[in-house]
Image: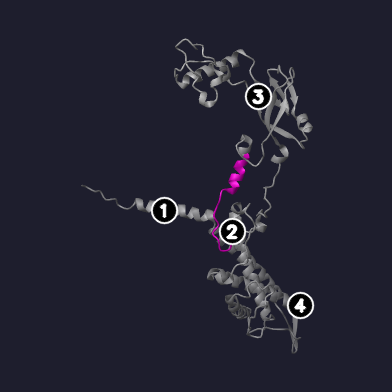
């Protein structure tokens, strides 16, 4: 049988890998041939023939580098996804960037609470009015919405139904007596509401007490201006006695509140881990720790490929007999090694997570404090 075997040397050329992710990197070009020799010898060459070619080793190396990058950047994405979400997908790839934490996701959440209080959020507050009818106490706001061509259900947020300002009924009982005062709020546009004609300056708390007395009188002795709103059925108190007064209110569309998507304003935004902009790593920038892992993982891939090849040729005839190849052993060992390497890499990334690093710094600071507590302190005598 004419089974292709490793010839003992190789010469890498760009285009020899399936995807060519790293073919233009001089360091990858150099390491590709070195790894091929390393892997072949680890698989038993030249004591035994290795039924692989140089391109098989190049493929394993490319696969291992890509797997390393995927594991690394997947961890980075998981660590920083809240900072990425909502940013344009056109931002610079994060490979060589220090990710700066931001408050965007927290602010987006807090805006929704502000929306309910009417002080923020992403839901538009709209204004409307309804004509009050003399003697009519109840008004159907759902019918108002239909009559005004509004699609969907509305939610009333604020109703401007209040008693007339007390200042409108503020009269100086001492006007013209010589001990009265001139309404000192002309600068606010309220001077015309008082008939006072004298020019005696009174403290502002005098006006406030008078206004408060009027308001308390209205609340206790008169039918208070108020309303009841249940399921958009509005009931107002007291019953209107005129029919030409408009009642103003603010409302939102429930469809606006129920909108789950952030307005992207025509941009393509980062929404999940799949479109966070990370690219394949630059091979020459991977340190010796990473490359060591890559070589081990590529060797496991090469061992797996060799196992599948030998599975096709389970027995090889030799003069007077035949030999059985170790396909099962190779595949079992390769699978175990790959699993172990992935677990080891993820455990290493866990030790470099933000949470772990901060915990280590906290423990280090506590240890230093305990050590310094045992250092004798000098007493200065002046």
Q: Secondary structure at mark 2?
A: helix
Answer whether residue 108 is magenta in the image.
yes
Please state which of residues 338 and 280 is positioned toward the viewer in this rendering.
Answer: 280
Q: Earlier in the sequence, mark 3 or mark 4?
A: 3
Crowding near pointer 3: few (<14 within 10 Å), some, many (20+)?
some
Tell me if label 4 and label 1 are in contact, CB under 8 Å.
no
**Mark toward the viewer: 3 or 4:** 3
| Residue that label 4 marks | 312
Q: Earlier in the sequence, mark 3 or mark 2?
A: 2
Q: Earlier in the sequence, mark 1 or mark 3?
A: 3
Q: Disc 3 versus disc 2: distance between alpha carbons? A: 55 Å
> Which residue is located at x 79 percent, y 31 percent?
147
Please state which of residues 325 and 300 is positioned toward the viewer in this rendering.
Answer: 300
> Which residue is located at x 71 percent, y 73 percent?
328
* Rendered location of residue 287, percent (x, y): 53, 69
Q: Disc 1 versus disc 2: distance between alpha carbons? A: 30 Å
| Residue that label 2 marks | 76
- Is the residue 34 above or below the residue 376 in the image? below
Q: Secondary structure at mark 1?
A: helix
Q: Quadrant of the N terminus?
A: bottom right
| Residue that label 1 marks | 367
User: Magenta span covers which residues?
Assistant: 94-112
Q: Earlier in the sequence, mark 2 or mark 4?
A: 2
């Amino acid at each position: 049988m004419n089974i292709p075997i490793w010839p003992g040397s190789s010469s890498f050329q760009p285009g020899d890998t399936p995807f060519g992710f790293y073919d233009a990197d001089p360091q990858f070009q150099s390491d590709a041939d070195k790894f091929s020799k390393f892997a072949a010898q680890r698989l038993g060459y030249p004591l035994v023939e290795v039924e692989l070619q140089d391109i098989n080793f190049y493929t394993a190396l490319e696969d291992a580098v890509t797997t390393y990058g995927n594991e690394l950047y997947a961890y980075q994405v998981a660590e920083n996804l809240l900072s990425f979400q909502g940013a344009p997908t056109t931002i610079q790839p994060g490979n060589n960037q220090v990710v700066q934490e931001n408050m965007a996701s927290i602010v987006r959440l807090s805006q929704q609470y502000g929306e309910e209080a009417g002080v923020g959020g992403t839901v538009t507050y709209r204004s409307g009015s309804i004509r009050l009818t003399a003697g009519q106490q109840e008004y159907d706001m759902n019918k108002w919405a239909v009559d005004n061509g509004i699609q969907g259900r509305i939610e009333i947020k604020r109703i401007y139904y209040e008693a007339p300002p007390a200042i409108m009924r503020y009269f100086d009982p001492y006007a013209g007596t010589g001990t009265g005062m001139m309404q000192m709020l002309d600068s606010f546009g309220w001077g015309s509401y008082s008939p006072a004609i004298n020019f005696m300056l009174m403290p502002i708390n005098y006006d406030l007490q008078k206004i408060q007395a009027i308001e308390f009188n209205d609340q206790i002795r008169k039918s208070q201006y108020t309303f009841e709103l249940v399921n958009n059925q509005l009931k107002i108190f007291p019953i209107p006695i005129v029919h030409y007064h408009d009642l103003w209110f603010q409302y939102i569309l429930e469809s606006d509140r129920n909108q789950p998507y952030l307005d992207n304003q025509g941009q393509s935004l980062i929404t999940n881990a799949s479109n966070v902009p990370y690219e394949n790593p630059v091979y020459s920038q991977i340190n010796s720790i990473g490359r060591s892992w890559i070589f081990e993982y590529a060797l496991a891939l090469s061992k797996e490929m060799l196992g599948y090849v030998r599975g096709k040729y389970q027995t090889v005839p030799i003069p007077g007999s035949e030999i059985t190849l170790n396909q099962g052993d190779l595949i079992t060992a390769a699978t175990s090694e790959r699993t172990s390497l992935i677990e080891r890499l993820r455990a290493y990334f866990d030790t470099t997570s933000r949470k772990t690093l901060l915990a280590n710094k906290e423990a280090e600071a506590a240890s230093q404090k305990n050590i310094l507590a045992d250092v004798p302190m000098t007493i200065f005598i002046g």
